[in-house]
Amino acid sequence: MLQIRDILWGFLYIACAVAIQVQVTPTHREISVGESKFFLCEVVGDAKDIDWFAPNGEKILPNNPNIQVSRNDETTSTLTIYHADVDHAGIYKCVAKNGDKEAQATVQVKIFQKITFKNVPSPQEFNEGDDADIVCDVVGSPVPFIIWKHKGARIQANKDVRYNIMENGHLLIRGIKKIDEGAYNCEARVMETGEINFKMINVIVNVLPTIRARQSEVNGTADMGGSILLACDADGYPEPIVTWAHNNVILESGDKYSLTEDGSELVIKDVIKVDEGDYTCIARNKAGEMSQEVSLNVFVQAKITYLNNQTATEFDDEVTLTCEASGDPTPSISWSFQNRMFSEGEQASWTRPDQYESHDGNIVVRSHARVSSLHLKNVDFTYAGEYLCTASNSIGQDNQPVYLEVRYAPKILGVVAVYTWEGNPANISCGVEAHPGASVTWFRDGLQVPSVNTSNVKIYSTQSSSYLEVSPESQSDFGSYNCTATNAMGTESKEFILIQAEVPSPPEIQRLEPFSSSAAVEFDEPVSFGGVPIIKYRLQWRSDGQDWTGRDYDATEDLTEFTIGGLTPDTNYEVKMSAINGKGEGENSAVVKFKTGPIRLLFTPSSEAPPLIVTTVTALKGEPSTPKLEAMVQNQGNALKVNWIMQDDGGSPINHYLVRYKAKHVSDWKPEIRMPRSSEYVVLSGLDWNTEYEIRIVAVNQKGKSEPGILSFRTATEPTTMPGASGSGLSTGAIVGILIVVFFVLLVAVDVTCYFLNKCGVLMCIAINFCGKAGPGAKSKDMEEGKAAFTKDESKEPIVEVRTEEEPTQNQEGVGPTEPNETTPLTEPDGKTKDDVKTEANNTAAEVKTVPNEAPQTNGNESKA
């Protein structure tokens, strides 16, 4: 099936059988710089030649590298433009010829160049104060125009004379400043195409350095190898590099000088006097340079220049150590040995080294000019070692050691007697001092040990000691062992004795202090340890007719006392103790008998008095037992007296008691109350009415705290009677007083009524005589002030009454009010009978509970005052 295009061409060919037709596809095209495009020339009719012509009219030849022409077939030819350039723009023509017949068609090619930044360096640097030409070279087709921005804002040269946008697009800043530094946006735009592009240029403003010396004058000391630091601090941008010059010569790092990386610090090595003078500190950066002078003054401190080590043999007549020193001013020289100082003109004794005034002549110091000599006479092995020569002047000092080597025969050290027992290895230590070093040999009964027949003897050696390890297997292994040390200077021997250890003698119980449930035992250590240290002490005790109970304690230096706990009160006991060392347990000490104390009771039980409210917890060993508590509500109903009974102090005296209490419906405790050791009660007053409280009391000794004694109680309901009311009725005086008040109130009421209704009465007379007028509307201040009411003050915190001494009772010469107890009649000082007191107690009863061990009570949870 023929296509429509073929049919049309067929008709065209028939219609124009003689003419030639040419068509270029496409007829126009826009190409960007660098792109490649082709164009097709189609010919209708018989054409012998098909040629392409460039916009300049020249025929395009096949060998053109950028624009190529190719004949596809008899009717078509292709024009290809590779990597288009702006020069390739224009009208291209396709011409077809056949004899004298010719036809042509054209195509218009437009070349567009995108915005291109040719020369836009970044960063661009300028010196502060210069006229800065910020370069931004842009090309494009059509030619773009430039906009400059800084810190997001467009630069408008017509508003700031410092800025100028030049014809080439560059930005000129006159007298650029440090604040002009930063990023600049060079933005290029083409209006015809709407194309836009930009480049960020980082502008750096360099600042001329400033420089300052840390010290304009430096005083140094030439120390024959010492060094001095000169320093300058420089500022500027970029950070300046610092160099140093002396006598117009630039100094560089080397053997004599050392410079830090930034050059700010100059170290002068091996300072000598000629290094003195002025040094120039120079700071340079891209903006320029600045300089500063530093003066160096050089002083010379004492310096030791010569020392000689010496070697001597013990018992030589004399040896001399020499020390030379330099310095300005001339130094003084002194000697020291093992913290002993020797100066010129002083002599010291080895037997009395702290007394330099001794004149035995063994040590003599002589000095002349810059040289000092230390003369040592009658050389002993103890002379060997390090001597220190010290040279000093007003500038400083120098210390250098010199060594004296003394050759001497061996000297054996060590403990002669060594204790052990069969089966327990023991080390016999033979310490040897010798120079040169000595060899050590062990002998037993003239024979060298260990021998091939002994396996229970071994030798271990260090640089200064030899150890003979003996594991005794029988009594024959105990006895004398000989240590012999030999070097080039001589030989020395020493006998060591291995002794059979014994068990320790018994310790002695010096003091025993019993308590109700414990006892403190103080002892003296055994007279004899048996030759080896005591490891443990064994303490045993028992009550009458019972087996011994014991406990072992590790032996320490400060162990002189034990505490036996968990004893039964009011019971007879006996105690003994022994000491144990590695050999075994020694004999027991003499048995000491004692009796624990009874439990102390504060009150005598009585059927008429309120029962004790008691709580107890078993005491920990060494700590007090839990105090037993009793509570007694006071007469006012919102106060409580709490007594405690101490059962056992744990073997140590009570230091103090700690009291805490709180209302049960709140979480916070009242501040802790600290009571002295002699206290036996505390009074809590000013408590809230009808409130349940919890109280805890702890006993404290040097071993620690007891478990707390705990009890609970409830205060009474707030009374509704007037203060001072008591018994079953009012007194006669109170009744008379009430009647007088009632009569006076009635009299005032009648007078007021007469004043308002009939304009008469006492008030009317007062109004007329003093005020000059009267009126029923006058207000009476007396009526306002006549109001009276009982108000209670509930703002006060509970008051805690702390008593550290017992209050006097009737048994104590009858002085002061009587404190009621089980044996005291409940009679008030104002003559109230016991029945009256009971009646008041019924009105102010408080509910008291004990936790956890509550003593039985005769009247429920109430305790009558």
Image: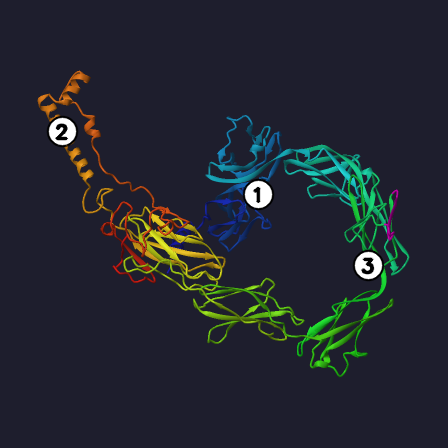
Q: In the rendered image, which residue does mark 3 sit on?
A: 382
Residue name at image x 88 percent, y 60 percent: 315
Query: Which of the numbered marks, if any, corresponds to residue 58?
Result: 1
- In the image, taking residue 787 as reference, residue 549 lies left or right, namely right
Residue nearest the viewer, comparing 790 with 248: 790
Q: Which of marks 2 and 3 is in front?
A: 2
Q: Residue at 34% across / 63% down in the picture?
A: 853
Q: Does the magenta stretch include residue 350?
A: no
Amino acid type at mark 2: Leu
Disc 2 from disc 3: Cα separation: 121 Å
The image shows residue 658, relative to residue 228, as above or below, that is below
User: Mark 2: which secondary structure?
Assistant: helix
Horizontally, is 772 left or right of 614 in the view? left
* 636 to the left or right of 677: left
Label 3, residues with CA under 10 Å away: few <14, some 14-19, many ≥20: few
The figure's colour scheme reads rainbow
Q: Of all residues shown, which one is farthest toward the top?
A: 772
List the residue tagged with mark 2: 747
Q: Which of disc 3 and disc 2 is earlier in sequence? A: 3
Mark 1 Cα-neighbour bin, 10 Å: few <14, some 14–19, many ≥20: few
Which badge, 3 or 1, comes first in the chain's sequence? 1
* Residue 546 visible at all: yes
- Residue 235 or residue 578, whichever sits in front: 578
Q: As rendered, which of 351 and 482 lies closer to the eye?
A: 351
Kind of residue at badge 3: Thr
Range covered by the magenta-colored residues: 359-369
